[in-house]
Amino acid sequence: MLAILTQVKTIALISQKGGSGKTTLATSLATQGCLEGLKTLLIDLDPQGSSYKWGKRRDIPAPTVMAGQAVALEQILEGAEGQGVDLVVIDTAPHSEKDARKACEVADLVLIPCRPSIHDLDAIEDTLNIAELTKATAFVVLNAVHPNAPKQFEDVKNALEMAYDPIKVLAGFYISNRSEFVHSASDGLTANESEPEGKAGQEIKVLFEMLDGIIGIYPPNVNNARTIE
């Protein structure tokens, strides 16, 4: 595939609640970027370093994975663009409003994972407030939804839209609770690598395409753009 880009695009995964699935989505999206032929950088801001440790388990050199600090994000992004990076994915720590705010400020798109439980629905308010204060382009993605459960998805989506106004939930889409997301991570892989044609892998591919539709990871204007084989 040919990827045509004019500048680095940045996606931040943010949730003030732990266990929302940020790291799984961050590593999966960064990997999908590589599979699409993009030079991709994954920045881990979480002191626990789950994404960074995942990168250490990999035998594959891409994406580049680095541990970083929120105060240095602008400098890191400047360096990334200078090195020809096309896509940056930021994995943030829970319970860190300062880091989340900085990630929101520098990101082209903020993705807020939310599991379908009442505790997660209640906890999402803090994250939404941070995104709103920074005027970030932010979308909620429902995560770990029971496979083939469209009613559960609709119920949670409706509950979010009733509780938080305005709110943007990715329309008609959710990430399912599939074992391949867990199994692949133990080997330093992602589901879209280990089983690219599997259901989990296909969900990540669809998510990546949806995000491209929102922020233009592949800008349509090819004038003065750099082309990557």
Image (tube, rainbow, N blue to C red):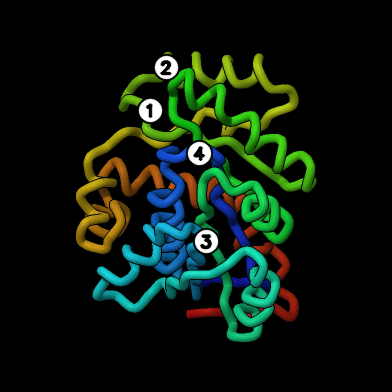
Which marked residue is nearer to the observer: mark 3 or mark 4? 3
Q: Position of residue 217 (x, y in %)?
A: 61, 61
Question: Spatial distance from mark 1 to mark 2, Cα to Cα?
Answer: 7 Å
- Report the label total: 4
Question: Which residue is located at x 65 percent, y 69 percent?
Answer: 73
**Disc 4 crowd, CA 10 A, few/some/many (<14, 14-19, 20+):** many
Question: Spatial distance from mark 3 to mark 2, Cα to Cα?
Answer: 32 Å
**Disc 3 crowd, CA 10 A, few/some/many (<14, 14-19, 20+):** many
Question: Spatial distance from mark 1 to mark 3, Cα to Cα?
Answer: 26 Å
| Residue that carries the numbered disc 4 in the rendered image | 113
| Residue that carries the numbered disc 1 in the rendered image | 145
Position of 117 relative to 169 (above/below)? above
Q: Position of residue 10 (x, y in %)?
A: 62, 62
| Residue that carries the numbered disc 2 in the rendered image | 152
**Disc 1 crowd, CA 10 A, few/some/many (<14, 14-19, 20+):** many
Instruction: Say what secondary structure mark 3 lies in.
Output: loop
The tag earlier along the polypeptide, 1 or 2, is 1
Circles 1 and 3 in contact, beta carbons < 8 Å: no
Q: Which mark is residue 223?
A: none
**Disc 2 crowd, CA 10 A, few/some/many (<14, 14-19, 20+):** some
Q: Amino acid at mark 4?
A: Pro
